[in-house]
Amino acid sequence: MWAIRHRSRKPTYVGADAARGTTSYYKLVAVDAAGNESSAATTQATRAIAFRAAGAAHNDTAPTLTLPVPTGVVAGDLMVASIAARGAPAATPPEGWTLLRQDVSSTRLRQVTYYRVATAEEPSAYTWSLSRASSAAGGVVAYSGVDPAHPIDLAAGRVNSSSRSITAPSVTTRVDGALLVGVFGIATTATLTPPD
């Protein structure tokens, strides 16, 4: 479970001291070529984090796992990749990815989560190397509206040795407008039912 930090996209006429994630209020007046002014119009806008797209892949047994970059990713989007591998092999990320969290359940499963702020030159996919051939699955999700300088507010995780349910740890975000995201991995073939 982690929280993504909100980014407030400020037009050039907004002061540089405006806080991230706040609501901006605007008063607009139109002026024609003759200098006539319209009545003032007011509006407000809050920039929120938005899901862009996701991509996923799996292998039966291989020393690598290649995950597609989600469709429509643009520079400044936050990409979060998570891989779960049976047998708990170590995972080496492609260049430019930052480790967010790693959880290991003895020798049964290793789940790693990385993030990256997209650039204008993203490839179509990224390949992670595993320390040995393993069955692995993973995905990449992309979000817009995230603060690229501080994209992650916090992270928490939990390993259950054996259970028929998955319980996410409790977290308290430190910034307004954060988005909670959870990823879960299991070391067996099963169907997951999301909560109501």
Image: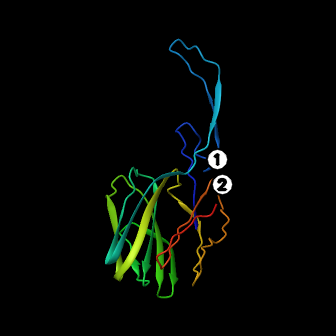
Could you tell me which secondary element the residue under label 2 belongs to?
loop
- Answer whether labels 2 and 1 touch (C-beta < 8 Å): yes
Look at 40% across and 56% down and name the residue there: 70
Look at 34% across and 65% down and name the residue there: 126
Residue hosting label 2: 176
Which of the pair 133/177 is nearer the observer?
A: 133
Which of the pair 12/169 is nearer the observer?
A: 169
Farthest-out residue, top: 34
Which of the pair 70/147 is nearer the observer?
A: 70
Question: Residue 189, position in %: x, y?
Answer: 46, 76
Residue hosting label 1: 22
Farthest-out residue, bottom: 107
Q: Find residue 130 and report its image quarter.
A: bottom left
Q: Amino acid at mark 1?
A: Thr
Could you tell me which secondary element the residue under label 1 belongs to?
loop
Mark with earlier residue (2, 1): 1
Look at 55% across and 19% down and name the residue there: 31
Q: Residues within 10 Å of mark 2 (few under 14, many from 20)?
A: few
Q: CA distance from mark 2 to mark 1?
A: 8 Å
